[in-house]
Image (tube, rainbow, N blue to C red):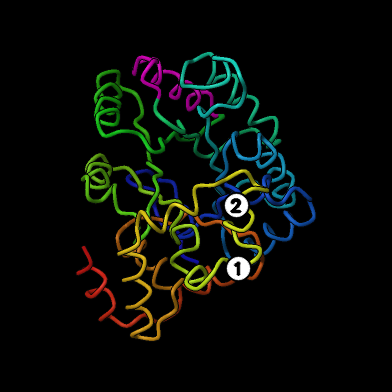
Amino acid sequence: MNYVRLGNSGLKITELTFGLALTIGTEITDVSQAQALIDKAWELGVRSFDVANSYGNGKAEYLLGQCLNKYPREEYVLLTKGSLPVGSTPYHRGLSRKHIMWAFNESLKRLGKEYVDVYFAHRYDPEVPMEEIVRTFNDLVRSNRALYWGVSEWPYEALDECVAVCDRLGMERPVTEQFIYSFAVQKHVKSGYKDTCTKYGMGTMGFSPLCQGFLTGKYRNDIPSGSRIAKSDDIDYQKTKNFYPQNKERIDGFLNICDKYNADYVAVALQWCLRNGVYPVFGSSKVTQLEQNVKALDMEVPDAIWAELSAIE
C-alpha cells in the first residue's frame, strides 16, 4: 500500500482510505465484527480511516475508536466530519460555531482520541457567514485537536469564497475536498470543480469509487442477497437503486469494456480513480471485499482500456 500526500499539505494518507458509511455502525454494530474488518484493513496496509458523526448516529465513531485502540495513534490517519443533522433541533446541524464546537467535542468523546487528523465541514451551510466557518475550523486546528480541516461536497462558489476568506484572514485553507466520484459519476470533473481543488492545492478524495457496487458487476443480472439494495430497508438507505438509471450508459460501457479485455472490474474502477488523482474512500462489509479492494491496486490492467473508457461521454 503506497502513501500519498494530501494536496499540498504534508499529510500522507494511504492510497485507499477505509470509509465506514453504511457499514460499521449501521449494518455492523457488533464490536467483534467491526474489529475483524479494521484488523484486516490494517493487515493489508490501510492506514487511513474515514468516518462521520452522522454515520450510525454516532455508533460508527464509537466502534472505530474502540477498534483502533490496539494500534499506535501516530501510525494512522483518522478523519471525521460534522454538520449533517444529528438531532431534531437547529443546534444539532449546520456549521455555526455553536454546533461545530459541540459536535467536534462529542466526536472526540466517541472516538476516545485526543485529536483527529482531518475534521471536515461535511456539507456547506449557507446560513453561516464564511468568516465564522473559517475561524471556527481554524480554532480547532490551533487547539491541536484537529491537525487539518477539509470540506465535503461543497458548492463551487462556496469553495472560492472560503479560500478567499482564508487568505484575507491569514488562516489555514482546507487541505482536501471529499466528493462522490467514480468512473460512473463524474459530475465534479465535468463541472471543473476537481480542477479548482487542484488549483487551490487541495487533495481530492472520492467516496463511492465503485458506484455503490454497480462497477463490480454484481447487479448486472439481479439483486444478490446481502447486497446494499437487498438490505436497503434494514439500513434505511434507498439511494443505491437510483444510481443505475442515473448513470446507465457509463456503467454498462465500463462493464462491457472490462469484459472485452477480461479485466477485473474492481481493479479498473479503483485504478481509474488513482490515475485521475482522486484517492478512493471505499467501504466494505466483509473481509473478502476488503481483500479484493486492496489486491486490485496491484492487478495489471491493459493500457488500451484507459483510452476506451475515456472515449465514453
Under mark 1, the amino acid is: Pro
To which residue does mark 2 refer?
A: 75
User: What residue is at 50 percent from the left and 53 percent from the top?
Assistant: 240
Q: Which mark is residue 224?
A: 1
Q: Which mark is residue 31?
A: none
Q: Which element carries disc 1, helix, strand or loop?
A: loop
Residue 131 included in the magenta stretch of the image: yes
Q: Position of 183 compared to 77: left or right?
A: left
User: What residue is at 29 percent from the left and 60 percent from the top?
Assistant: 276
Depth order, front residue of 165/37: 37
Real-space Cα separation, disc 2 to disc 1, in angstroms: 37 Å
Residue 184 location (% of width, % of height): 35, 60
Residue 215 location (% of width, % of height): 43, 66
User: What residue is at 62 percent from the left and 23 percent from the top?
Assistant: 87
Q: Which element carries disc 2, helix, strand or loop?
A: helix
Q: Measured along the vertical axis of the image, is residue 110 above or below residue 47? A: above
Residue 99 location (% of width, % of height): 54, 18
First in sequence, mark 2 or 1: give its number: 2
Residue 304 location (% of width, % of height): 25, 81
- What's the magenta region? 125-144
